[in-house]
Every structure is written in C-alpha cells, then in structure tokens.
Amino acid sequence: QSALTQPASVSGSPGQSITISCTGISSDVDSYSLVSWYQQHPGKAPKLMLYEVIKRPSGVSSRFSGSESGNTASLTISGLQAEDEAGYYCCSYARSGTLEFGGGTKVTVL
Amino acid sequence: QVQLQESGPGLVKPSETLSLTCSVSGASITSYYWHWIRQPPGKGLEWIGYFYHSGNTKYNPSLKSRITISVDTSNNQFSLKLSSMTAADTAVYYCVRGSGTHYFDYWGQGTQVTVSS
C-alpha cells in the first residue's frame, strides 16, 4: 500500500482536460517540492512527464502541466488525446532521502 | 543518446539471490544517480534504491536488508543483488538514470524476473 494516494482511474473525452491528484505527501511536497510524474503505456517502460512539480523535460507536450497545494500534487492533461491513454504515476522524494511512488492512475480516453 | 539495458536470469528459485546488471551507454556511470525500480505484474512501481558514484547509496527501507547496489566503472555498468527471493519479488525490474536524487529521466526496457521452483 502506497503512502501516496492516486485515484485508480480517470476518464475524459478527446479535447477535454483531466486532473490526476497525488495526496499524502505533506512532509515531502511542502518541504521540497520534489514531485515527478511518469506516463506508462502497457508493456512499456515509464516516461518522465514532469519533475519538481511543474517542470517539463524537453519533448514533453505543453498539454501536460503540474501544480501542488498543501499535501496534494496534481497532473493536468489539457486537450486530451487518444495517445494520452496510459497509466500515470506520481513520485515523491522524502526527507529520509528515499523515494516513493503513488499507486498509479489509469487514464481512459472515451 | 542515453541507453540502459538490463541483463540477468529470467527465473530465480525461492531463497536464492537475484543478480541483475545494467549496461549504460551515452552517459558516464561516474556521474548521475543510478536506480533500480520494479513493477510486480498488474501492479504499480516500487523504488528499490540507488547508487551514486561517490559510493553513496540509498535503499527502500522495506527491502534494505536484502539489497546491494554497486557500480562497475570499468564497464560502465551497475548491478543489483536481491537476496532471499520469494514469489513476492516476481516483477519487471528496470534500471534507471536519475539526473538528481529525485527523478528518473532515462529507463531501461525492463527485464522480467519470476521466482519459482
């Protein structure tokens, strides 16, 4: 059982915006803001989508954005596309120097 | 172009020690953080631990007593040893580069490890 809680599933129609939350990181996020997000298609390795809450690596679409409030970090996908259908995982860096993943969220494009 | 490739046995017997190696190209093993992450079938990601070239290591507390991560600078590789394997350790194991301690920018394709007698 993860200490970071994500909804098991989120769905949306093409063109819509969806938001995935990642809660339970008060001691980590508030102190360090070291949250990252990963996209994983079935049978593939995860891909870095955001790091340090809001930063996008080169090549990641600007449709992906991040935020944080209190003990919750969020990933928003704008202009949802069929290719966005995948699993999404948050990850937080803890004071102890360890890292922890959320349980993952399956995004379905209707 | 940074590439990571895991290698090791696909099948391990219960109580044995798993040994996996990750070969790195396009980046020096003497820089960056080198992590292992696993994913049991149908489940989420679990961080195992990392090695930094200075000799600094950090392990998942739930696995700490069974893990050793080391680096072979001459071959630009790093390795994972996980002892006392059980069926709960069955997973896809990924070797991963961290540009810092807190996020993972390059992943290997993953290698399936099954624990069974």
Image: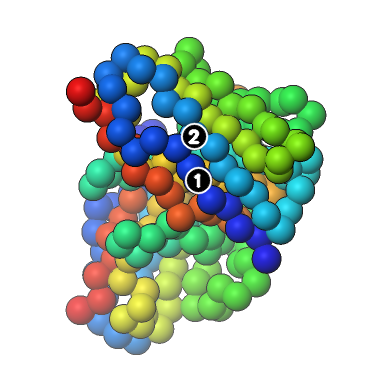
Verify CB contact (< 8 Å) between mark 2 and mark 1: yes
Q: Residue furthest bottom?
A: A15
Q: Identify which residue is drawn at 71% across, 40% down.
A: B75
How many residues crowd around disc 1 within 10 Å: few (fewer than 14), some, or many (20 or more)? many
Which quadrant holds the N terminus of chain B? bottom right
The chain containing the residue under callout 1 comes to B
Residue A95 visible to an observer of this rendering: no
A96 vs B42, nearest the viewer: B42
- Residue topped by disc 2: B20
- Residue topped by disc 1: B6
What's the residue type where badge 2 is placed? Leu
Residue A54: image quadrant is: bottom right
Q: Identify which residue is drawn at 33% across, 50% down.
A: A104
Which quadrant holds the C terminus of chain B? top left
B90 relative to B28 in the view: left or right:
left
Q: Identify which residue is drawn at 50% across, 45% down.
A: B6
Q: Identify which residue is drawn at 57% across, 42% down.
A: B22
